């Protein structure tokens, strides 16, 4: 077998293994209810699961706990066979008749990190908090800086310090670049760099979506986002995810007006990977970044369906 064939086979077995484990775990509550383990010389379902399937005590315990909590959520319970106990357990304490179907849909189509964040938001504790212990010397230095800045609030003082540090870093980088440039050569280099960027944009536009102009001719519109447009979008949030209270750096640019529909790159919003998943899984009311809010059951459209299929490949 070639290296590629070994890799493909390994991945296939990995998927099969996950599916088998999920089905084994889903059977445990019934085995425990009927006391089947006693017929095979085991004192408990934990011993039985370990002896005959190699399942850990923790997994068995979680499976029985989830079964107990999902009495009013049969669809979410059924999803356990497909996605596993760990994803389903994230919503076990908040699942009910009203949200059963929509939560089952989420666990089937969203990644575990995105589901963890969604679970936190639904519970109202998604905003991350950081605690820093300052020793006597650090407290002295911090108070001294606050006095120099003329700021009384600890939070505002930290914000000012961090911003000043980042601005200083940017200035240092620019100065370093200027020293390396040959005097009088800047104009030529800038033109050359701009030309290269434009050429790259044109090359990447080969993967395009043809649309009709008023004259009837087809104009290719690239899914690739040009450097200038990308930079403008990222600058609006200083490279931070635009989702309310998110402290992560942006990872993806989200088309608020679906590109497949508009064929343009207007209204781009920088988002982290998790909150980009939110946007395409019907959990966010889209009425502008500052007003984004979680709401289960937001209607999904055809573009979201395609996104979800692509993510699962």
Image (tube, grey):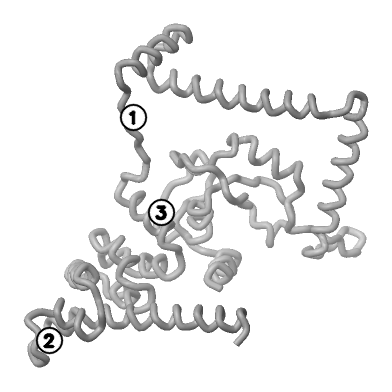
Quarter holding residue 126: top left
Element type at marker 2?
helix
Residue at position x 32%, y 64% from top? 99
Residue 39 vs residue 159, the one in the foreground:
39
User: On the picture, is 194 further left or further right than 266?
Assistant: right
Residue at position x 45%, y 64% from top? 110
Mark 1 and mark 2: Cα distance apart in space: 50 Å
Residue picked out by circle 2: 37
Residue picked out by circle 1: 132
Residue at position x 18%, y 69% from top? 61
With respect to residue 183, does 78 lie above or below? below
Please report whichever mark, 3 or 2, sits nearer to the chain's N-terminal start: 2
x and y percentages locating residue 8 in the rendered image: 56, 81
Please report whichever mark, 1 or 2, sits nearer to the chain's N-terminal start: 2
Local packing at callout 1 (Cα closer than 10 Å; few below 14, some 14-19, many 20+) is few
Element type at marker 3?
loop
Residue picked out by circle 3: 295
- Decide if residue 128 is in sight here: yes
With respect to residue 106, does 291 lie above or below? above
Image quadrant where one finds the N terminus: bottom right
Residue 105 vs residue 227, the one in the foreground:
227
Tag 1 and tag 2, C-beta contact below 8 Å:
no
Mark 1 and mark 3: Cα distance apart in space: 33 Å
x and y percentages locating residue 56 in the rendered image: 23, 72
x and y percentages locating residue 236 in the rendered image: 62, 35
Please report whichever mark, 1 or 3, sits nearer to the chain's N-terminal start: 1
Local packing at callout 3 (Cα closer than 10 Å; few below 14, some 14-19, many 20+) is few
Q: Nearer the viewer, mark 3 or mark 2?
A: 2
Local packing at callout 2 (Cα closer than 10 Å; few below 14, some 14-19, many 20+) is some
x and y percentages locating residue 65 in the rendered image: 18, 68
Mark 3 and mark 2: Cα distance apart in space: 43 Å
């Amino acid at each position: 077998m070639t290296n590629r064939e070994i890799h493909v086979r390994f991945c296939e077995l990995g998927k099969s293994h996950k599916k088998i484990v999920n089905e084994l775990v889903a059977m445990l509550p019934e085995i425990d209810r009927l006391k089947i383990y006693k017929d095979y010389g085991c004192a408990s379902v934990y011993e039985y699961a370990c002896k005959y399937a190699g399942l850990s005590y923790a997994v068995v315990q979680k499976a029985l706990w989830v079964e107990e909590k999902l009495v009013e959520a049969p669809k979410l319970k059924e999803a356990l066979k497909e996605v596993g106990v760990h994803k389903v357990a994230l919503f076990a304490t908040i699942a009910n008749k009203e949200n059963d179907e929509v939560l089952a849909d989420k666990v089937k189509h969203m990644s575990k990190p995105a589901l963890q964040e969604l679970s936190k938001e639904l519970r109202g504790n998604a905003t991350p908090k950081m605690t820093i212990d300052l020793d006597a010397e650090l407290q002295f230095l911090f108070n001294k800086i606050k006095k120099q800045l003329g700021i009384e609030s600890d939070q505002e003082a930290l914000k000012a310090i961090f911003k000043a540090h980042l601005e200083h870093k940017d200035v240092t980088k620019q100065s370093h670049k200027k020293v390396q440039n040959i005097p009088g050569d800047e104009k030529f280099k800038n033109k050359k760099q701009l030309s290269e960027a434009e050429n790259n944009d044109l090359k990447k536009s080969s993967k395009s979506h043809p649309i009709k102009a008023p004259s009837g001719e087809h104009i290719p519109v690239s899914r690739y986002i040009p450097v200038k447009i990308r930079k403008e979008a990222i600058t609006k949030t200083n490279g931070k995810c635009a989702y309310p209270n998110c402290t992560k750096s942006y990872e993806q640019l989200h088309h608020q007006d679906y590109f497949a529909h508009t064929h343009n790159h207007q209204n781009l919003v920088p988002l982290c990977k998790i909150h980009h998943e939110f946007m395409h899984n019907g959990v966010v009311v889209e009425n502008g970044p500052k007003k984004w809010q979680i709401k289960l059951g937001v209607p999904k459209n055809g573009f979201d369906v395609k996104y979800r299929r692509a993510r699962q490949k």
